[in-house]
Structures are given as C-alpha cells and as structure tokens.
Image: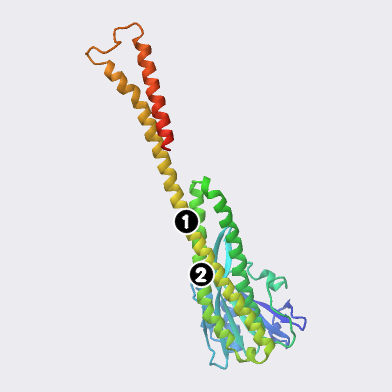
Amino acid sequence: MKYYVHHRDQKYYLSGEHASKKEDCRWIHLINPTEEEIRFLSGEYNVPEAILSSVADPSEVARSEGRYRSEYDLFILRYPVEVEEGVYETRPIAMINTEELIITVKYYNDQSFADFLKGKGHRLIEDESFPKEKILVDLAYHICKSYIDHTKSINARIERLEKDIARSTKSETIREIISLSRSLIRFSMATENNEPVLHALFDLEVLNSSPARNQLLNDLKIESTQAQVMVKEASVTVEKLSDLYSSLVGNNLNDVMKTLTSITILLTVPTIIGGFWGMNTSLPLSEGPYAFWWLLGLTTAVIVLMYFYLKRKDYL
C-alpha cells in the first residue's frame, strides 16, 4: 500500500505508513494489495472488501457503480500495457472516490503509471482550486493518452510492415500481423467499454461546478474520442494489411507455379523430339552423318522459340 500526499503544487509525493491520517493525504494507491490491507481500508473508509478487490480478476470489465451512494463512487477502467515488445494487453484499475480521499487498486506491478506518479506523465491543467476528484480525471486522462501513445507505436510498426510486405513472405510477418490485430482488438474493446465509465465520471457534481472544471472534462472527452478513433483506424489498416499480405502471398504462389510450369514445358521439348527419332520408322536425315547435330539444333530452336513465346506471355 502506498500513500500519496497531494500538495498545492499539484504533485503527488510518496509518504510513509498511515499517511491517510494526515489532512493533506488525498490518494491511496494499492498495487497487488494483501488481504490485510483490504480489510484495513474497508474498515477505515467504509468501502466493501468486494469493491476494493474487484479488479483481482484480470478480465474484470470496465464499469461504474455507487453514484447514488454517499459512501463511495467506484470507477473501473482498463488501461493498456506493453507486456513484451510489440505485444499489448489491457488490465483493470479500480478508482474509488470516498468522502476523505481517492483509493486506486490494481493487481499488476507494471510501470503503466510510473511516469504519472513521478510528475512526468500526461496530466491536465494545474489548478490548486480543483478538488480531490481531479485525481480521477488526471488518471483517466493518462489512460486515454496511453492508448494514443501505444497506438502510435503500433502505427509505426504498421508503416514498417507496409514497406517490407511486398518482398517478404516470411512467417514472422504473419505472426506480427496477428499480434498487432490482437492488440488492437483488446484496445478497441477496452476503449469502448471505458466510454460509459468516463461519462459516469463526467456526472460527478463537483466536477461540473465551474467553467474551468467543465473545460477539464471537455479535454478528457476529446482525448477519449481521439483514442477510440485512432484505435479503429489502426484496426482497419491492419485488417487491410492482412488482406494485402494474403493477396501478395497468393500472387507470389501463382508466379512460382507459372514459372515452374513453363520450365516443365521447356524441358519436355527434347523428350518429345527425341521420342520421334527413337521410333522404328524412317525419318528425314535419320541416316545422315549429321543427324544428331540436326536433332540438337532443332531441339534448341524449338526451346528458344517457346522460351520467347512464354516470356512474351509473362509466364517467365
């Protein structure tokens, strides 16, 4: 369990144990919490243990609840994370708004919010007059921007594939396209499911009490929409790229088959001509001293003529 103190400089500082007792503590951040920590916070802030541990299931869907309760508001969003190079997943984070402070819970010790906690991540306007609920908006904004950043990385990989795809038929290309497609499917589902939760966040009365705060929410809406649009565009591009790759592989296979068929035809010419001369019948020049060379010349001439014919028809 980590306690963060939110000062007037709008930065979050990691504090010591039991910092929640201090008046300036506005945020408790739990990473893979123990049952003891869950029980402690449940009793301290009157939040059910089931709510605090709701994101223990990695497949937990984005949702919100408690908007009509006085004790807490729950917002579960799915955030993106790169689990290995070029492979992305989405994981749940629970954001709980209590009367005293904000509690966030996630069960993966990834680095998705490391820059945010260091003050280097994506954040909205700085204003000391904003309430603790601004932490929720900042976190949601950071998640939306993370989708945008990861989608930009995927787009860069797509551009590289587009340049190499015409001359590449390696299985690695297929695996990379499949990996990109899976990542974008996860992103698409997550951003769509996050959208209703963000709208529930917009409905918090304290965030709609001034024009400045309305502008804050509007900025978040813009980033959320941009994330969804970019993910959809990248998904369509990968789908078209997959179709293009399939067409190129099929076309390359057809070219190989045409070439092999043409070579086979050329190689059958000596066999056919030699077969005539091997019959037990009299043929022109068969008894002459230069019959073999005439036969060789005729075969060569036929092969050359057929070669240029096939070349002209684009079979070679």
In the image, residue 182 sits, relative to residue 107, either above or below, namely: above
Residue farthest along the left direction in this orientation? 281
- The circle on residue 188 is 2
Q: What residue type is labelled 1?
A: Ser
Could one spot residue 134 in this view of the protein? yes
**Circle 1: is it few (<14), some (14-19), or many (20+) Cα within 10 Å?**
some
Residue farthest along the top direction in this orientation? 289
Q: Which amino acid does label 2 sit on?
A: Ser
Task: Name the residue rendered at 36%, 31% in the picture.
Answer: 264
Question: In the image shown, does 294 or 73 lie closer to the viewer?
Answer: 294
Residue identified by numbered label 1: 242
Q: How many numbered circles does the render carry?
A: 2
Judged from the image, the secondary structure of the residue bearing numbered disc 2 is helix
Judged from the image, the secondary structure of the residue bearing numbered disc 1 is helix
**Quadrant where the image shows the N terminus:** bottom right
- For residue 201, which quarter of the picture? bottom right
Q: Residue 163's spot in the image, x, y percent? A: 57, 51
Q: Residue 110's spot in the image, x, y percent? A: 61, 67
Q: Residue 72's spot in the image, x, y percent? A: 57, 89
**Quadrant where the image shows the C terminus:** top left
Task: Name the residue rendered at 71%, 82% in the picture.
Answer: 19
In the image, residue 253 sits, relative to residue 70, either above or below, namely: above
Question: In the image shown, does 247 or 71 lie closer to the viewer?
Answer: 247
- For residue 32, which quarter of the picture? bottom right
Question: In the image shown, does 40 or 314 lie closer to the viewer?
Answer: 314
**Circle 2: is it few (<14), some (14-19), or many (20+) Cα within 10 Å?**
many
Q: Residue 294's spot in the image, x, y percent? A: 36, 13
In the image, residue 159 sits, relative to residue 46, either above or below, namely: above
- Of mark 1 and mark 2, the one earlier in the sequence is 2
